[in-house]
Image (tube, helix red, strand yellow):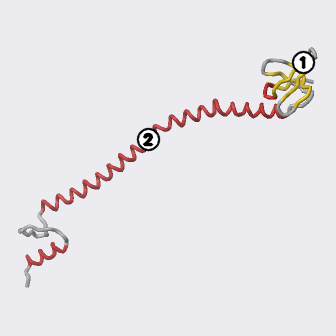
Amino acid sequence: MIGEQGARLLRDRRAGETLKSETYECGSPPALRKASNLERKSTTSEKKAYFIERGEEEMAGLKSLIPILLMFAIFYFLLIRPQQKRQKSVREMQSSMKKGDKIVTIGGLHGTIESINDLIVVIRSNDGAKLTFDRNAIREVRNEA
């Protein structure tokens, strides 16, 4: 038969390990076994470190976006949103104007609407003069009773 040493050689070759001329009780030299275990541990810890570093980099990227998003939110609520509300109220006021309304223009002229169409408003001032303005030139409607 092959013998104990031959059986070890066959078993080690089947496992895919390359052997030197010496044989050891468990198939590979103790130094190689310890090194391979250390390599496995170090590769696992290296993988963990890699993912931790990558996660920290992603978090750092997100942390740098937070001030920008916060500034955008502040600008929206302090500047953009109030301006949109004012524009909406001006559009509603200008669309609801009718003949006989007392108005004030952007230039400060007070008068009464004599006639109105889509783009032009004819205003009668207090001295009786008729003035033609663009509809967008009306700042406010004052219907005081």
Q: Residue at x 12, y 62 (%)?
A: 30
The answer to whether residue 125 is above or below residue 22 is above
Expressed as whole percent of the image width and height from the top left, the position of residue 137 reads 79, 25
Residue extending farthest top: 127
Rendered location of residue 120, percent (x, y): 84, 29
* Structural distance between the alpha carbons of marks 1 and 2: 62 Å
* Disc 2 crowd, CA 10 A, few/some/many (<14, 14-19, 20+): few
Q: Is residue 130 above or below residue 85?
A: above
**144 or 5, which lies in front?**
144
Viewer-closest of 1 and 79: 79
| Residue type (three-letter) at the residue carrying disc 1 | Ser
Q: Nearer the viewer, residue 123 or 7?
A: 123
Nearer the observer: mark 1 or 2; the answer is: 1
10 Å neighbourhood of mark 1: few (<14), some, or many (≥20)?
some
Q: Position of residue 50 (x, y in %)?
A: 33, 49
**What residue lies at 12% left-to-right and 59% top-to-bottom?**
31
Instruction: Report the amino acid beneath label 2.
Output: Gly
Q: Which residue is mark 1?
A: 125
Residue 108: x, y in percent?
A: 80, 17
- Residue beneath the point at 87% across and 20% down: 131
